[in-house]
Image (spheres, helix red, strand yellow):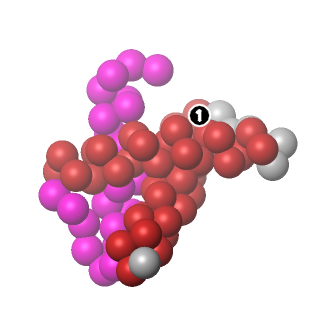
Amino acid sequence: MSIIAWLIIGGLAGWIAGNIMRGGGFGLLGNIGVGIVGAVVGGFLFSLLGLSSGGFIGSLVTAVVGAVVLLWVIAKVRKA
């Protein structure tokens, strides 16, 4: 996957996860960062469950799920 696709999927996933978890995005660079890290987390979680996804939509879903989990963990750590 090209770097441009990584940035697009990361930005979209971060923006969607930000809207799901706290009602707003994190700015362009924040969205991309959250989305890319979320893609790694989502890929790890999907592999643990024996799931796989392919293509643009599958990668986006994986990244969004991972980003939501990442933001949830960060929110729990901040409260503690």
Q: Residue at x 39, y 40 (%)?
A: 36
Residue 79 visible in the picture: yes
Q: Is residue 22 magenta?
A: yes
- Outermost residue toward the front in this view: 80
Res. 59 image quadrant: top right
**Above or below, 56 relative to 60:** above
Residue 16 image point, x, y percent: 39, 63
Residue 77 image point, x, y percent: 43, 69
Q: Residue at x 39, y 19 (%)?
A: 2
Quarter placement of the C terminus:
bottom left
Q: Residue at x 59, y 47 (%)?
A: 42
Say which amino acid is labelled 1.
Gly
Relative placement, left or right, of 11 versus 35 is left
Residue 20 visible in the picture: no
Residue 15 image point, x, y percent: 32, 60
Foreground residue among 25 and 41: 41
Relative placement, left or right, of 12 versus 59 is left
Foreground residue among 47 and 55: 47
Q: Is residue 78 magenta?
A: no
Q: How many marks?
A: 1
Q: Which residue is mark 1?
A: 55
- Outermost residue toward the top in this view: 2
Q: Secondary structure at mark 1?
A: helix
Q: Which residues are magenta?
A: 1-27
Relative placement, left or right, of 73 versus 49 is left
Q: Residue at x 65, y 40 (%)?
A: 44
Q: Residues within 10 Å of mark 1 (few under 14, many from 20)?
A: few
